[in-house]
Amino acid sequence: MNKIYFAGSIRGGRNDLELYREIIGYLTNFGEVLTEHIGDAGLSPMGETGISDSEIYHRDIYWLSQSGFIVAEVSTPSLGVGFEISRAIELKKKVLCLYRGQQGRKLSAMISGCPDIQVKEYQTLEEVKQIIGNFFTDDR
Amino acid sequence: MNKIYFAGSIRGGRNDLELYREIIGYLTNFGEVLTEHIGDAGLSPMGETGISDSEIYHRDIYWLSQSGFIVAEVSTPSLGVGFEISRAIELKKKVLCLYRGQQGRKLSAMISGCPDIQVKEYQTLEEVKQIIGNFFTDDR
């Protein structure tokens, strides 16, 4: 079964929490999502409790290394998401970034200019689902 | 002469622009700063003009590969800064992250929990200068 690493902002801000939850739910049609907690409404911008930052770091890098597919929602700027995308590329994973275009903002050039990332803009959840479906059925 | 890569938020937001300018100015005491444009007041959150995102990406990764030292200001969440820090670690560079502790916020666990990064909290520019001085005179 495919293992999927979903990346979304936690400490960078939880504005898109509901959207993360919807994306994670849809991703489970294509494999096991190792990072389901990203969509947990109980997870505040202060992050997980009862686990040290060092433990989170090593667990997440382990999960990333186990996953074949990385799907990142990149509309909310986040150090952790940027870090994970870069590491995923080094590990030769297949990486999809979902970006909701916003007036007066632009996606980081380190993401949009990177040849090893598929970046897809969307506006609606329906569009996200179509993009994800194509990502997992695409043979590249 | 040391080559230094300074990383700070551009498209993630320019709130700390003046601080970036001060840090870059101080860093020039320790080497050549390849990314001086990060402190340019003319550089808006829309990013550089007259250059494509692909060109920015490849130029920045080239500069990163040439630098021995990476200094990142990580108080403003940024995909690009997270990406660059991760890549710097893969390239075995010496990495310093400067973080201004803020009420109700926490630094990403991918930064604070990573064993290959020196993370230093500060509140004043004087503290930043002392931290940077130690970073460049420290023999580790």
Image: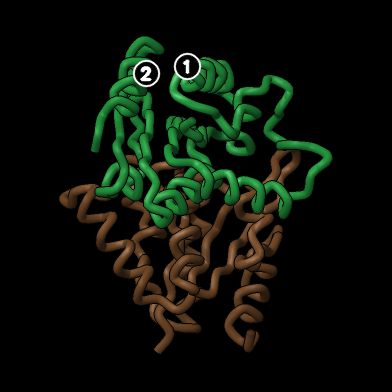
Chain colours: A green, B brown
Identify residue for label 1: A26
The residue under the point 37% across, 24% down is A100
Tell me the quarter of the picture where residue B31 sits.
bottom left
Q: Are marks 2 and 1 in contact (CB under 8 Å)?
A: yes
Q: Residues within 10 Å of mark 1 (few under 14, many from 20)?
A: some
Identify residue for label 2: A128
Front in this rendered view, residue B56 or B86: B86
The residue under the point 43% across, 52% down is A86
* Left or right relative to A126: residue B106: right
Task: From the top left corner, tell me how far across and down residue A38 is, in percent.
Answer: 61, 29
Q: Secondary structure at mark 2?
A: helix
First in sequence, mark 2 or 1: give its number: 1
The residue under the point 66% across, 73% down is B131
Front in this rendered view, residue B55 or B14: B55
Task: From the top left corner, tell me how far across and down residue B45 is, in percent.
Answer: 37, 42
Residue type, mark 1 in image: Tyr
What is the residue that sits farthest to the left in this orientation? Answer: B50
One can see residue B77 in this view:
no
User: Vertically, is A140 above or below A132?
Assistant: below
Residue type, mark 2 in image: Val
